[in-house]
């Protein structure tokens, strides 16, 4: 082997090692194979994974949150029609339909070009890459961050803050961010925060830097939608809806009332999620008896 051949071989080896250290090209999915996607990581490289079996819940399946449905559905309708629309923060009691409402909106508007990309909190730093990947697409994309909350100092907090409204680049007009959280300001609120408030000379009360930082992220969402715990009758109404979806008769639904209340008491919650779980359990037992 000549010296030139040796040099070329060594150069090729060095280049191959350098290529392994450089960020690769994000693989583009087949957009025709699904309406919902997840951002995943493999070997440090992010990619969009198609959700083959997306949740099929519809807006009509969500009861006793009519005001919240109207707000989210209208905002999403504006978005898919290319009209001005807001990033959305859905907050409140657990199991009351926050995530389900976003999934239902996807099913409602998917035929009009709406697509959903679910991003874990740990991957929020990749938001610029995700937006670059879809910015030129004709579809309308909701980036969905579920059950979002931050502890102080987490990197994803600042990444989301910049993505919402803090970068020199304008947010792509075919992308919105919808996030759900049990915390209105997405970060823990402590008694010590109250000590940071101070009085101005004119008597106004102003928050300190710590509180301002916590509020600043949630304020970047243009639309806030709050969810509240269900009353007993609301809970039973949701139970009845899901039992009907499992083909239970009205007599069976009436007979299930006491069991449904005990089920909720055991779990300490009268939420839509608990109602759905009870209905599956109750209807499944009825079906099993029918086959005995």
Image (cartoon, grey):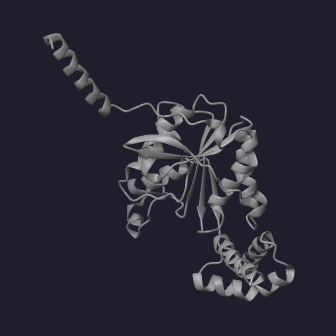
* Percent coordinates x, y for residue 65 in the rendering: 73, 64
Residue at 27 percent of width and 24 percent of height: 15
Q: Is residue 25 above or below residue 281?
A: above
- Residue at horizontal 72%, vertical 44%? 110
Residue 247 image position (x, y, % from top left): 81, 72
Taking the spot 66% from the left edge, 87% from the top edge, the residue there is: 262
Residue lying farthest right?
Answer: 250
Against 29, residue 100 (above or below) is: below
Quarter of the figure with the N terminus: top left
Q: Nearer the viewer, residue 163 or 274?
A: 274
Q: Nearer the viewer, residue 197 or 204?
A: 197
Q: Is residue 243 left or right of residue 40?
A: right
Along the horizontal axis of the image, is 21 left or right of 151? left
Q: Is residue 24 above or below residue 1?
A: below
In the rendered structure, the answer to whether residue 135 lies left or right of residue 103 reads left
Q: Nearer the viewer, residue 250 or 50?
A: 50
Q: Identify the residue at horizontal 31%, vertical 28% (top origin).
A: 19
The residue most toward the left is 3
- Measuring from the top left, give residue 277's x and y in whole percent: 65, 74
Q: Say whether residue 200 is visible.
A: no
Return the x and y of residue 93 as percentages of the image width and height. 60, 69
208 relative to 178 in the view: left or right: left
Q: Is residue 66 visible?
A: yes
Q: Is residue 194 above or below residue 43?
A: below
């Amino acid at each position: 082997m000549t010296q030139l051949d040796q040099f070329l071989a060594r150069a090729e080896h060095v280049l191959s090692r350098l290529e392994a250290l450089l960020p690769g090209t994000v693989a583009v999915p087949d957009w025709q194979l699904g309406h919902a996607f997840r951002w995943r990581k493999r070997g440090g490289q992010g990619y969009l994974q198609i959700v083959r079996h997306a949740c099929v819940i519809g807006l009509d399946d969500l009861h006793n949150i009519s005001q919240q449905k109207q707000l989210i559905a209208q905002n999403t309708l504006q978005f898919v029609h290319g009209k001005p629309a807001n990033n959305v923060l859905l907050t409140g009691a657990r199991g009351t339909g926050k995530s389900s409402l976003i999934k239902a909106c996807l099913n409602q508007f998917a035929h009009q070009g709406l697509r959903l990309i679910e991003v874990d909190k740990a991957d929020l730093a990749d938001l610029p890459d995700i937006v670059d990947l879809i910015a030129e697409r004709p579809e309308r994309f909701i980036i969905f961050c579920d059950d979002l909350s931050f502890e102080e100092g987490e990197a994803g907090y600042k990444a989301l803050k910049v993505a919402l409204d803090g970068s020199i680049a304008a947010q792509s007009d075919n992308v919105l961010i919808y996030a759900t959280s049990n915390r209105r300001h997405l970060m823990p609120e402590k008694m010590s925060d109250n000590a940071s408030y101070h009085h101005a000379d004119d008597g106004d009360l102003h928050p300190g830097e710590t509180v301002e930082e916590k509020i600043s992220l949630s304020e970047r969402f243009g639309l806030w939608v709050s969810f509240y715990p269900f009353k007993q009758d609301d809970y039973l109404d949701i139970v009845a809806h899901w039992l009907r979806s499992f083909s239970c008769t009205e007599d069976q639904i009436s007979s299930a009332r006491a069991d449904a209340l005990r089920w909720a008491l055991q779990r300490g919650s009268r939420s839509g999620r608990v109602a759905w779980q009870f209905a599956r359990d109750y209807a499944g037992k009825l079906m099993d008896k029918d086959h005995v």
